[in-house]
Amino acid sequence: MNLKINGINIEVTDALKDYISTKLDRIVRHSDNVISATVTLSVDKLEQKAEVDWHMAGKDLHLDQTDKDMYAAIDLLADKLDRAVLKHKGKKQQHQHRAEPSGKLSVEE
């Protein structure tokens, strides 16, 4: 997976990079078809915002979360992203198992 971290009006430190990568590693375990992720961190007065563009095979997700603390915003964003990835995975599995067996006839005696 390609991971890119951008900062708008904020310096992205090594601690923030490590924190984001550990949070996203947990989500990558749920979905093995992740192509790339771009995380954008921004600060607007007292509002800390974390956004992610998550590109998977067959689906692109864009999520954002705001909070007063950047680490809390990243935590909430990771939880939201995890739910969205699991929801997509569940929908994908439902469509694969909908096929009915063909060619089987029941014979009554």
Image (cartoon, grey):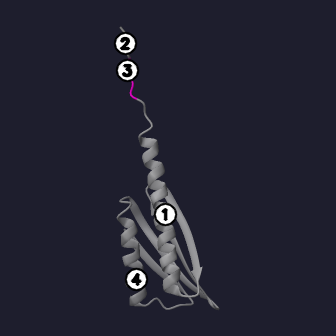
Q: Which mark is residue 103?
A: 3
Nearer the camera: disc 1 or disc 4: 1
Query: Label 1: how many residues lie within 10 Å, few (<14), some (14-19) or many (20+)?
Result: few
Q: Residue at x 51, y 72 (%)?
A: 52
Give how far apart the Cα atoms at labels 3 and 1 are. Answer: 38 Å
Dot 1: what SS? helix
Q: Residue at x 38, y 28 (%)?
A: 101
**Position in image of residue 24 (x %, y %):** 40, 72
Nearer the camera: disc 2 or disc 1: 2
Q: Earlier in the sequence, mark 2 or mark 4?
A: 4
Give how far apart the Cα atoms at labels 1 and 4 are. Answer: 19 Å
Q: Which mark is residue 83?
A: 1
Q: Residue at x 43, y 86 (%)?
A: 16
Three-letter amino acid code at disc 2? Answer: Val
Query: Label 3: how many residues lie within 10 Å, few (<14), some (14-19) or many (20+)?
Result: few
Contact between marks 2 and 1 (CB within 8 A): the answer is: no
